[in-house]
């Protein structure tokens, strides 16, 4: 069985795939609680499928882009479980997961935009069932377009993306399908950061005396 989960957005999503179909799913109802919700989510899908961790033969995990803390929770969990169980772990760009769902809905030429905070979005472009640009972090006004834009980032900035649609966040069930069918590039389970963590940036700005220069 393939256990899939993504923590690149404010919500945690988990799914269990038996090789032919998704047999259990879980989506957290509390945002920004990745550390508290991922383990119960994994336990929930295993219980619903009447399976145990020993039945898991591989892990799929969203690698972002996304906030540092959320990504870290998902990727550390994936690596730890894979090591403990002696199984493989496959990473997928979280924007590719959204794109796969959009393709399943019949879309072909579109952009994916997710919330990057700081009034920015993570953006990637897709055509002919492939990612053809990005991901990158940009200001919506700098990439305003009438093209179809899918994801939470698009819905947050209607003035820049007037032609927007859901889904808003990656779905672990789609993530599992992407890995099983190898619909997009499979990556190492390393975080796809497009900017440095805030704490590192603050430290880097400090002068030798410990003060932050004006």
Image (tube, helix red, strand yellow):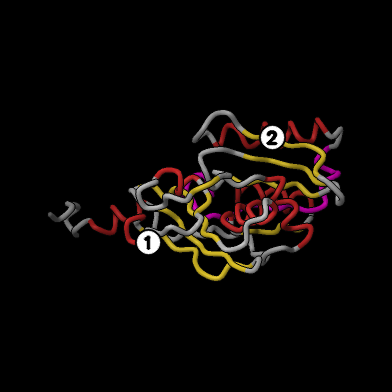
Name the spot of residue 177 as percent of width and height, x first: 75, 53
Q: Quadrant of the C terminus?
A: bottom left
Give the x, y percent position of residue 202: 28, 52
Residue most extreme to the top: 29
Q: Position of residue 85 (x, y in %)?
A: 78, 50
Secondary structure at numbered mark 1: helix
Q: Nearer the viewer, residue 154 or 194?
A: 154
* Closer to the eye: label 2 or 1: 1
Q: Is residue 127 above or below residue 159?
A: below
Give the residues drawn in magenta, as a range: 52-73
Residue extending farthest left: 214
Q: Residue under circle 1?
A: 143
Location of residue 50 by image quarter: top right
What residue is at 58 percent from the left and 44 percent from the top?
A: 167
Q: Earlier in the sequence, mark 2 or mark 1?
A: 2
The answer to whether residue 172 shows anywhere in this view is yes
* Identity of the residue drawn at 85% across and 36% down: 51
- Distance from label 2 to label 1 (Cα)? 34 Å
- The answer to whether residue 73 of the structure is visible from this angle is no
Find numbered disc 2 in the image and state the secondary structure of the residue it sits on.
Answer: strand
The residue that mark 2 highlights is 26
Q: Is residue 80 left or right of residue 133?
A: right
Q: Nearer the viewer, residue 76 or 110?
A: 110
- Image x and y of residue 207, in percent: 18, 58
Does 125 appear above or below 152? Answer: below
Please report contact status of discs 2 and 1: CB closer than 8 Å, yes or no: no
């Amino acid at each position: 069985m393939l256990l899939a989960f993504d923590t690149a957005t404010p919500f945690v999503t988990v799914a269990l795939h038996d090789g032919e179909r998704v047999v259990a799913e879980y989506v957290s109802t509390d945002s920004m609680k990745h550390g508290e919700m991922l383990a119960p989510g994994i336990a929930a899908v295993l219980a619903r499928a009447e399976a145990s961790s020993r039945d898991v033969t591989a892990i799929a995990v969203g690698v972002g882009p996304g906030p540092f803390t959320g990504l870290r929770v998902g990727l550390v969990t994936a690596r730890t479980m894979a090591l403990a169980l002696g199984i493989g772990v496959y990473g997928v760009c979280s924007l590719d997961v959204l794109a796969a769902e959009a393709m399943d809905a019949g879309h072909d030429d579109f952009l994916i935009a997710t919330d990057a905070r700081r009034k920015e979005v993570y953006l990637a472009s897709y055509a002919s069932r492939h990612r053809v640009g990005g991901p990158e972090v940009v200001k919506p006004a700098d990439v305003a377009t009438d093209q179809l834009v899918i994801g939470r980032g698009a819905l947050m900035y209607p003035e820049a993306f007037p032609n927007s649609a859901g889904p808003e966040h990656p779905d672990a069930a789609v993530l599992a399908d992407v890995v099983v069918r190898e619909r997009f590039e499979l990556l190492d389970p390393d975080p796809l950061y497009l900017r440095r963590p805030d704490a590192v940036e603050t430290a880097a700005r400090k002068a030798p005396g410990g003060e932050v220069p004006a």
